[in-house]
Amino acid sequence: MASRFTKHIEHVWHTPRFSPIYHCWGFDMDTGELLQELFGQLHHRLDDIEQQLQVLHNRLNAELETPAKLVKLSDAWKLLGYKNYDACLYKVRSGHYRAGKEIIDRRSPQSSRPDWYADIEKCQTRDRTLAAKRTTLRSA
């Protein structure tokens, strides 16, 4: 003999909009509505991811653009990735970037103050070179 609870479960089980998993979670949706809702959420999330990828793609392409051959040091420090101008100037004065190779002094003949310009490609190559190789290149 079936209990009242068992009869209730059988009645609910056979109703057309019942799904045992979603009914116990408090949803009153059929499978089609649930799938539409899930696909809608998935589509919205994929749109967000696509936008983030597009922003990242644009940012990376902007970083890869080749700058002008020689850039004034006051602008070059940003392109070389230094936090400020003084950090880049320190690299010039310490000899990390060599005058006449990576750095060009374009001051007028009457001026005593240097007007530094950086060759961005050569500076980046110099930054990628290991310190041990840089010292052997200087002595050679």
Image (cartoon, rainbow, N blue to C red):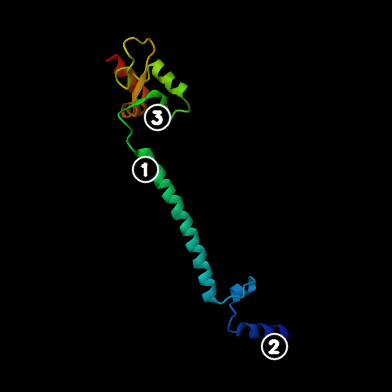
Amino acid type indicated by mark 1: Asn
Name the image quarter holding the C terminus: top left
Q: Which residue is mark 1?
A: 61
Image quadrant where residue 90 sits: top left
Amino acid type indicated by mark 2: Ala
Q: Which residue appears at 61% of the width and 84% of the height?
A: 15
Q: Nearer the viewer, residue 29 or 121?
A: 121
Residue 2's disc is: 2
Q: Nearer the viewer, residue 8 or 29?
A: 29
Q: Position of residue 135 (x, y in %)?
A: 34, 18
Query: Looking at this rendering, what residue extends furthest in the right direction?
Result: 4
Mark pair 2, 3: CA separation: 80 Å
Say which element carries label 3. helix
Q: Earlier in the sequence, mark 2 or mark 1?
A: 2
Image quadrant where residue 138 sits: top left
Closest to the camera, between mark 2 and mark 1, is 1
Q: Which residue is mark 3?
A: 80
Q: Position of residue 84 (x, y in %)?
A: 47, 26
Image quadrant where residue 100 sits: top left
Q: Earlier in the sequence, mark 1 or mark 3?
A: 1
Q: Position of residue 112 (x, y in %)?
A: 37, 9
Q: Which residue appears at 31% of the width and 29% of the height?
A: 121
Mark pair 1, 3: CA separation: 16 Å
Q: Which residue appears at 43% of the width and 30% of the height?
A: 78
Q: Residues within 10 Å of mark 1 (few under 14, many from 20)?
A: few
Name the image quarter holding the N terminus: bottom right
Say which element carries label 1. helix
Q: Is residue 31 left or right of residue 103?
A: right
Amino acid type indicated by mark 3: Leu
Q: Position of residue 45 (x, y in %)?
A: 50, 59
